[in-house]
Amino acid sequence: MQITLIFSATVFFSMALNLQLVLVHHLNGQKMEKYYLLGVTLFSLAVTVPPYASGQFGGSPSEGCWYYNPNPGELKQWIMGTDSVPLVALATGEVMAFLTILGYFISCEIHWRQVREDSQDLDSTNLEDVVPHRSPIIMYSNVILRIGLYPLVSCLMNIPISVLDLWADNSLVERLTDNVLSNGRVLVYSLLALTDPSFIRAMKEIHSSTMTIPHNDDGMGLAALEVTQRRKTGGGGRKQIIQAGRHASDVTTDVGEREGRLFSVQEKNMKEEEDGVEFTHQI
């Protein structure tokens, strides 16, 4: 259980660090995934293996299966070195990464605001292609919200748990609070993952791809149905078949034109979100 706790906390720190490297320093996050995985694994083992090898895990009358040492001073040292300090340090690192990214967005906002003010004195028809119409903070509000919730949850969950773990003689209320925070952390992290914009966008893409029906098949199906009905009513002949084929072509063309207009509208609405999608793919 301890290794999964450290592993999950390190993964969320890696996510915050990855966002900072991609957005601020313009590095390729996909190429660095293997380094994140290696670093998370090594850090988790380095924190959890020493207390296990030293026999610091055992049964405690008040805590159950947890750190156990007859010497209270040594017990606090092991808890601080392999549990409390790493969790607080990782949560602090997430907050620092969030503040760095937020400062980057603010600097971008100041820069483009100055560019818009300077461009008012210029007579250029191509300024709309260079200067963004909306504020970068508004354009990437989902990204800012995403990177802000994770460190907030880490601080609200990990820091109180780390403080409670350091107390040798916990009361019933304190132990209950510690257990609620420890078990509720998994639920909160799961809800954050389910409401993540990238996850929602991926689910929408999967749903839309499964519901898509080729429009050519619809046109040919209507043509075949019309030919069959004409044959059953006794009005067959080469002329009806040719008319049915023309009707199928008209139906296919009409469906294609409607989908083309719909695609144009969607493309126009999504034009301002291409930068955000590009950041998501890099991450």
Image (cartoon, rainbow, N blue to C red):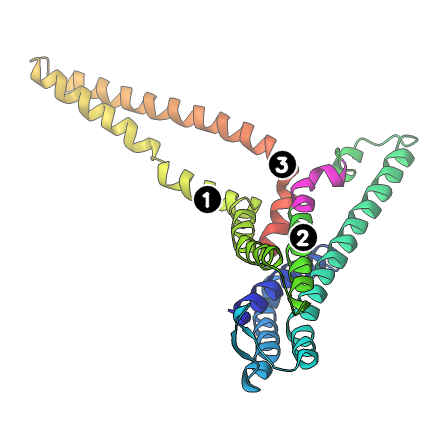
- Residue 194: x and y, percent? 51, 46
> Disc 3 or disc 1, which is closer to the eye?
1
Query: Residue under circle 1?
Result: 203
Name the front one of labels 2 and 3: 2
The disc labelled 3 sits on which kind of residue? Lys
Residue for point 62% across, 57% down: 174
Q: Residue at x 55, y 85 (%)?
A: 55
In the rendered structure, which disc, 3 or 1, sits on the residue that comes first in sequence? Answer: 1
| Residue 204, horizontal then vertical, whole percent | 46, 40
How far apart are the two marked residues, 2 and 3, measured between alpha carbons?
Answer: 37 Å
Q: Quadrant of the C terminus?
A: bottom right
Q: Label 1 is placed on what type of residue? A: Met
Looking at the image, residue 209 sits to the left or right of residue 16; the answer is left
Depth order, front residue of 138/178: 178
The mark that comes first in sequence, 2 or 3, is: 2
Q: Residue under circle 3?
A: 271
Q: Are marks 1 and 2 in contact (CB under 8 Å)?
A: no
Residue at horizontal 52 percent and vertical 56 percent from the top: 183
Taking 185 as reference, is 53 above or below it? below
